Amino acid sequence: MPLTPLGRRALGTPSPRGRTARRTLGTAAALAASMAAFVATAPQAAAADNSARCPSGKLCLFQYGGYKGEMKTVSSSLATMGAFNDKTSSLVNNSSLWAVAYTGADYTGYAGDDTLLISPHNGAIDLSGGAFDGAFDNKISSIRVATTEYEAVQGVPWMDWLRQTEDKRPAGAAQAGKFGDLNNDARPDLLERADDGRLWFLSGIGDAEWETKGKLVGGGWNAMTQLTRHGDYNGDAKEDLYARDKSGVLWFYPGRGDGTFGARVRVGGGWNTMREISAAGDLTGDGRRDLLARDTAGKLWLYPGNGKGLLSARKLIGSGGWNAMTQLASPGDMNGDGRSDLLARDGSRALWLYPGNGKGAFGARKKLPYAWPTDEPVISTGDVNGDGLSDLMRPIDSQLFVYHGNGKGSVGGPNADMLWDTASHVRVF
């Protein structure tokens, strides 16, 4: 959902993270409403000597309307407001933080009351004088702040990726299907780079209440312009990760088998000439996983893996025209022949399957059903529902949808899954 730097009234308390709530939402429209259906309001003008009391870089609450009276600065979440409970009549956000103000303690709202979403650098918002129908004037009892909107609204920085026992992959999967499982528990898992650069491992394991907990891999991952994984690249039976930094250096991160990674190894420089990089599995039939990259001239290159995390001399497998594609995705074996395949989405929103021949090339392409918008990623981490067939995923607005593969080179219709963080720098793979 598009966001504007305005104070907004959230109609109802943000939805709980539990699986039941997530599953019963059903549509992207309902999900967007659960995360917050907003009535926008512009920051109100105020006398400079009042709202200007709030320092640069701070979120400030004021005792009276017009930014008068006692002032309280907020830099972290407050489950209770202490002496400032029910004493806020105006506020100014000069900080880079997102915030959600609640009318109840512990980030809750009284029945029928609202929550207020405050965006970064929102400026002045006067809650007095009947603003917001008086819903917040002297009624704020807790406030949650975070670096991302998703975390401020949901209360956690990671997305709620949950897989049930029946979603576990069957034993004895073909080599082409052995990817998308960083901790080797037979559950499909995800990596999520949040908008603020933190990388989270989403194991899919939930607690008794069906709530999940992300595992922090580390921060600073927004320094990477490409992130890709597709199984074990160094022969230790643990899934690995490749990442390209802003200077064009490609790095290999060996997996530890627990969703985290060991010391990185430099693969090489000059990778900024590549528009896109995709770890693709074993395309050559030698038992080693390979890498694909399309360059800025529209050529497609195969980089054979050496089985130790590094790459052998590249081979041209597409002489031109690949600039017509807006994304590559590597689904493993989509058509049931035991060979790794390639997906490519074009500028007309068509998604094409290029079946691998096991010799480092592809057969005649086949168009998959549905439109695949160019402003949303196509995600492929293999089998996500335990039937042994490779599936696809994509977000629609604020919800992720799964398209189950049929094992014959196509997919079924969309099935609603977890809430999706719509921030611009989020990357899930």
Image (tube, rainbow, N blue to C red):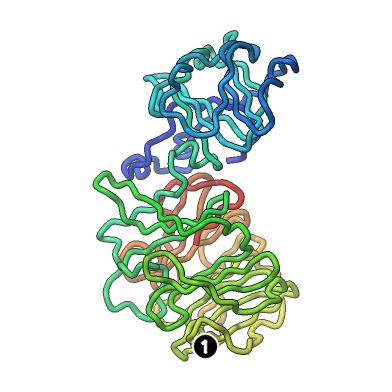
Decide which of 115, 386 is in the foreground and name it. Answer: 115
Q: Residue at x 40, y 19 (%)?
A: 112
Q: Quadrant of residue 314?
A: bottom right
Tag 1, which secondary structure?
Answer: loop
Q: Residue at x 60, y 24 (%)?
A: 60
Q: Quadrant of residue 5?
A: top right
Residue labelled with disc 1:
306
Decide which of 359, 145 is in the foreground and name it. Answer: 145
| Numbered-mark total | 1
The answer to whether residue 330 of the structure is visible from this angle is: no
x, y percent for residue 183: 36, 67
Decide which of 199, 70 is in the foreground and name it. Answer: 70
x, y percent for residue 172: 28, 79
Q: The disc labelled 1 sits on which kind of residue? A: Asn
The answer to whether residue 290 of the structure is visible from this angle is: yes
| 398 relative to 342, above or below | above
Q: Residue furthest top?
A: 129
Q: Residue at x 53, y 45 (%)?
A: 397
x, y percent for residue 427: 55, 57
Q: Quadrant of residue 244?
A: bottom right
x, y percent for residue 38: 55, 29
In the picture, the quarter occupied by the N terminus is top right
Q: Residue at x 71, y 76 (%)?
A: 270
| 422 relative to 368, above or below | above
Within 10 Å of the Cα at label 1, are there few (<14), some (14-19), or many (20+) other Cα atoms? some
